[in-house]
Amino acid sequence: MKNYIVHFIRGLWSLLVGMYTTLRVFFRKKTTERYPENRKQLVMFDRFRGELVLLHDEQNHHGCIACGICETNCPNGTIRLTSEMVTDEAGKKKKVLVEYQYDHGSCIFCQLCVRTCPQRTLAFIPTFEHAVFTREKLVHKLNREGSSVAPKPVAGSSITA
């Protein structure tokens, strides 16, 4: 009988502590974001890694030389480069980027691609709305239509996402 009373009091005490915690949290000021309604005011942190982008300048030039280091360093094959060899005016063969494909659905946001890019043409931007109904919509082509490799870097040119 004594054991039963001890267990009953412990259970009752546990229940009261839980109810006290629930009531204390219930009357706190709410911190929930009103997400779809305040979409225009919502700002993510600068260090948030939302989406990988290939940086382009105002003339639609990017700095990717299709070296494939980002593709090699990606731990789960999120990045796929398609390149071709082209001969320039001087007769030199040069590798040119045809398509830069990024699978947002399988990316683990480790940033190995950004850190190892020798041309510094990759970056993560803080976008956060990526909900889709099919996984195929999470595969993005990062190089824009009609984009090309930037000529030798000129001082003062700005590259944007």
Image (cartoon, rainbow, N blue to C red):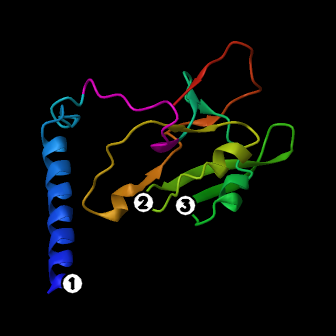
Q: Earlier in the sequence, mark 1 or mark 2?
A: 1
Label 3, label 1: how far apart the Cα atoms are: 60 Å
Amino acid at the residue labelled 2: Gly
Decide if residue 50 is on the left or right side of residue 16.
right
Mark 1 lies on residue: 3
Q: x, y (%) of residue 1?
A: 14, 87
Mark 3 lies on residue: 78
Label 1, label 2: how far apart the Cα atoms are: 55 Å
Residue at the spot 20% in from the left edge and 49% down from the top edge: 21
Q: Is residue 132 magenta?
A: no
The residues colored magenta run 40-52
Is the C-beta separation of discs 1 and 2 under 8 Å? no
Amino acid at the residue labelled 1: Asn
In which quadrant of the rendered view does residue 147 lie?
A: top right
Q: x, y (%) of residue 68?
A: 71, 55
Mark 2 lies on residue: 105
